[in-house]
Image: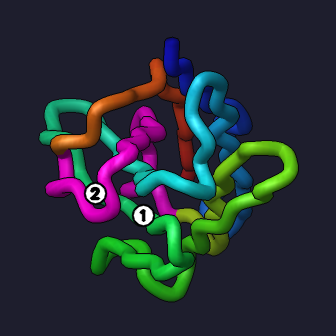
Amino acid sequence: QVRLVESGGGLVQAGGSLRLSCEASGITLSDAAVGWYRSGSGMQREFVANIFSRGSTNYGDSVKGRFTISRDTGKNIVYLQMNNLRPEDTAVYYCAADERYSPPRDKYTYWGQGTQVTVSS
């Protein structure tokens, strides 16, 4: 059974940083496509970033240059480093994984429960 658990969310002032973690069991994240998505109040789920098994990454336009996705193969964790946070980054952040090499965005098979990030102005 695959389980994804996000952590690292919290309350931070604008301009601050947070690092989210996505810890997995039942799936090897370095062999999977792993994505971060977010859903703010009244907003549709938004793509944030993803990383593929070969290491290539993609970012949503609103986070490019501020967020970095990475993974720790030994710990089976994928991170999302978020710098220069803005109030509009406030959302629940979800980790998703899929064993297909390049699954369609928002069609990942496995999803975590999410972690809340709140950025105050």
Q: Quick check: 56 left or right of 80?
A: left
Q: Secondary structure at mark 1?
A: strand
Residue 11 vs residue 23, the one in the foreground: 23
Q: Nearer the viewer, mark 2 or mark 1?
A: 1
Residue located farthest toward the bottom when viewing the structure as drawn: 65
- Residue 42 lies in the magenta-colored region: no
Estimate the x, y position of residue 76 in percent, counting from the top left: 74, 44
For the C terminus, give its image quadrant: bottom right
Residue 34 vs residue 38, the one in the foreground: 34
User: Which amino acid type is marked by label 2?
Assistant: Phe
Q: Name the residue at 55% across, 19% down.
A: 3
Res. 12 in view: no
Provide the residue span drawn in magenta.
Answer: 86-106
Q: Name the residue at 47% across, 39% down.
A: 95
- Badge 1: residue crowd in 10 Å (few <14, some 14–19, many ≥20): many
- C-alpha separation, residue under disc 2 versus residue under disc 1: 8 Å
Estimate the x, y position of residue 50 in percent, counting from the top left: 42, 64
Q: Which residue is mark 2?
A: 47
Q: Secondary structure at mark 2?
A: strand
Residue 48, located in which quarter of the rendered image?
bottom left
Q: Quick check: 18 left or right of 43?
A: right
Q: Name the residue at 63% across, 39% down.
A: 22
- Residue 93 lies in the magenta-colored region: yes
Q: Which residue is mark 1?
A: 50
Residue 45, located in which quarter of the rendered image?
top left
Residue 109 vs residue 99, the one in the foreground: 99
Whether tag 2 and tag 1 are in contact, CB under 8 A, the answer is yes
